[in-house]
Image (tube, grey):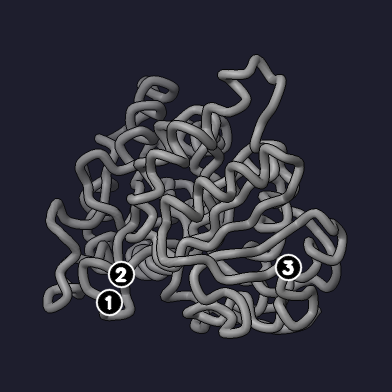
Amino acid sequence: MAEMNMLQAVNEALSIAMQADERMVVFGEDVGHFGGVFRATSGLQEKFGRSRCFNTPLTEQGIAGFANGLASNGMTAVAEIQFADYIFPAFDQIVNESAKFRYRSGNEFNVGSLVFRTPYGGGIAGGHYHSQSPEAYFTQTPGLKVVVPRNPAQAKGLLLASIRDKNPVIFFEPKRLYRASVGEVPAGDYEIELGKAEVVREGKDITLVAWGAQMEIIEKAADMAAKEGISCEIIDLRTLAPWDVDTVADSVKKTGRLLVNHEAPLTGGFAGEIAATIQQECFLYLESPISRVCGLDTPYPLVHEKEYMPDALKTFEAIKASVNF
């Protein structure tokens, strides 16, 4: 297996998918010859031509509307929103059009072959307009799938699965891992099943759940807890909509405790949905209240980024409090 970073894995997935599907087009702000602001689409225009990888004007609502039109006419559309913070002007097109195309037509037409790729999250000193984690906004929208990889091998397999899924997908890429996450990636064409969580580490005292860049955080916290004799089971959710209730519930029935970590603010974050569902599924098995270690209910602060982040120390303290409840 070749070793590559997450950007290279995303690029390879796009190239493989475009090679296999001549109807697939990649577009967005600066994605053509420039290769995107992070270079995720480098070389695609040279390889497949300007008609299949091209720049758009700086209009996210226009990008999303154009993507809906292409997908509804049988094309495979992969649109890049340059930063997840910029996805909000496209919100109406995604939530009211992409998500509802199939439903409102009684399955007569759809935009199933549609993916919105977008880098999300902090940790790069990007301030409040380049650091947000808006995944929860889209998980409440029936008709959309929401996917978040944690490493290069996942980025490639999950992106290929998303492109070929028959539903519109929002594919959030953790930007602080783009070059920092390096690992072995299987060669060739492969897919990772959407909607299926991965048990990364087995344990018996508490279940830790996260996704994307926060997986590294909870793994560090679990290592700290292990030195205190606390055994943590670690689950990477990978897909938030639909999310794998059974895998998390089975784990919590074993450990009796649950901690969910995400970078987005606490209030209205997806951790609340997980907590409510697991409380309903596992009430008689719980040994302590479900814990949420999340971002703060403030705009993302540039100067206080370190204080804002739900880091390993905060997670470790929450683990100890849960076990000692």
Question: Which residue corresponds to the image point at 36% horizontal and 43% vertical from the top-left?
Answer: 136
Give the alpha-carbon distance from disc 2 to disc 3, as whole Å.
Answer: 29 Å
Q: Neighbour class for label 1 at 10 Å: few (<14), some, many (≥20)?
A: some
| Mark number displayed over residue 51 | 3
Question: Which residue corresponds to the image point at 29% horizontal and 54% vertical from the top-left?
Answer: 264
Label 3 element class: loop
| Mark number displayed over residue 30 | none
Question: Which residue corresponds to the image point at 44% horizontal and 31% vertical from the top-left?
Answer: 96
Label 2 element class: loop
Question: Which residue corresponds to the image point at 27% horizontal and 76% vertical from the top-left?
Answer: 126
* Rendered image quadrant of residue 129: bottom left
**Tag 3: amino acid:** Ser
Task: Give left or right: position of 268 versus 97.
Answer: left
Q: Is residue 106 above or below residue 5?
A: above
Task: Give left or right: position of 58 versus 153.
Answer: left
Q: In this orientation, which residue lies closer to the viewer: 193 or 62?
A: 62
* Pointer 2 or 3: first along the chain: 3
Residue holding disc 1: 126
Whole-percent x, y for residue 186 in the image: 79, 71
Whole-percent x, y for residue 54 in the image: 63, 70
**Tag 1: amino acid:** Gly
Q: Neighbour class for label 3 at 10 Å: few (<14), some, many (≥20)?
A: few
| Disc 2 versus disc 3: nearer the observer | 3
